[in-house]
Amino acid sequence: MFNLDVLFSTTNILLFMAILTRISGLFASAPLFSTYPIPIQGKVWLAVLIAFVLFPIVQYNTSFTAPNSVPALSVILFKEFLIGYTIGFCANIIFVGIELGVNMFAIQMGLSVSQALNPTSGGSSPIITQVYTYLATMIFITVGAYQWLFAALYNSFKSLPIGFTFAFTPEMVGSILTVTCQIFNIGLSIALPIFGVLFITDVLLGFTSKMMPQMNIFMVSMPLKIYLGLLLSLIFMRPMAEYIGTLLERFLTQVTLIF
């Protein structure tokens, strides 16, 4: 029989709160969970369900002791939220890098002025950026990248146990900074194929304007670059999707190993 006095003890209740807080931090910054307008009720119930699943595992592998004051409990909960938020933030770097890269060649195409509300981020972004964001999200779901996300969350309870111990090792901090710096590599790798062709097009149009000064090159260049950029986006869509899938697997494996 279950002993309800032990099951619903103060220590177990606070331990469950700490687990739920770490999961809430993950949902606040992780891709898919934070970037899409999922109903708050759905996020809450999903977080509670995951906390129920993790509770017996964490309870068995931890020596958590209940704090004896509200400020101490607040410090623990803040620490748990920060850990979860850091995991989600590292995983979301790849989506920010993709958006950065697409914005680069969207500006080169001349589509940066045609912005609309982006439901994934809550701000405004070019339409083509939203297309690539949706593409990356579908790949994220297809390759099961959320499994690496939850694996990193599960591993974090071993490497960063619940309690007052809050030690980000130098190796862990260095790995987090390395992952964060990859945002520029991701952005350049996404933008370079299309951006390079459009840059060469600008150079050729510049030579054309020098050879034919009477030609209104501006009226020709704008629709030409938009048409060429959209055509290149369609041509590179499949290899870009394969590259994003490989990038997601490699990147989220690094995040899992960090925590």
Image (cartoon, rainbow, N blue to C red):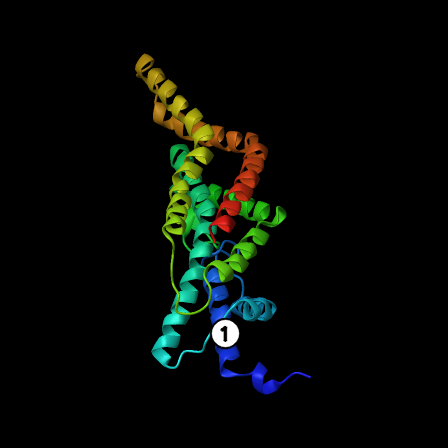
Against 60, residue 12 (above or below) is below
Residue 198 drawn at (x, y percent): 42, 27
Looking at the rendering, which quadrant does residue 72 occupy? bottom left
Decide: few, some or many residues near mark 1? Use Cα within 10 Å; few <14, some 14-19, many ≥20.
many
Looking at the rendering, which quadrant does residue 8 occupy? bottom right
Residue annotated with mark 1:
15
- Residue at 37% over, 24% down: 202
Residue 119 drawn at (x, y percent): 48, 55
- Asked if residue 111 can be seen in this view, the reply is no
- Taking depth in this image into account, of 244 and 210 the one nearest to the observer is 244
Residue 69 drawn at (x, y percent): 37, 81
In the image: residue 178, left or right of residue 142: left
Q: Give the residue type at disc 1.
A: Leu
- Residue at 56% over, 55% down: 151
Image quarter (top left, top right, bottom left or bottom right) of the N terminus = bottom right
- Taking depth in this image into account, of 101 and 88 the one nearest to the observer is 88
As helix, strand or loop, the secondary structure at mark 1 comes to: helix
- Taking depth in this image into account, of 5 and 48 the one nearest to the observer is 5
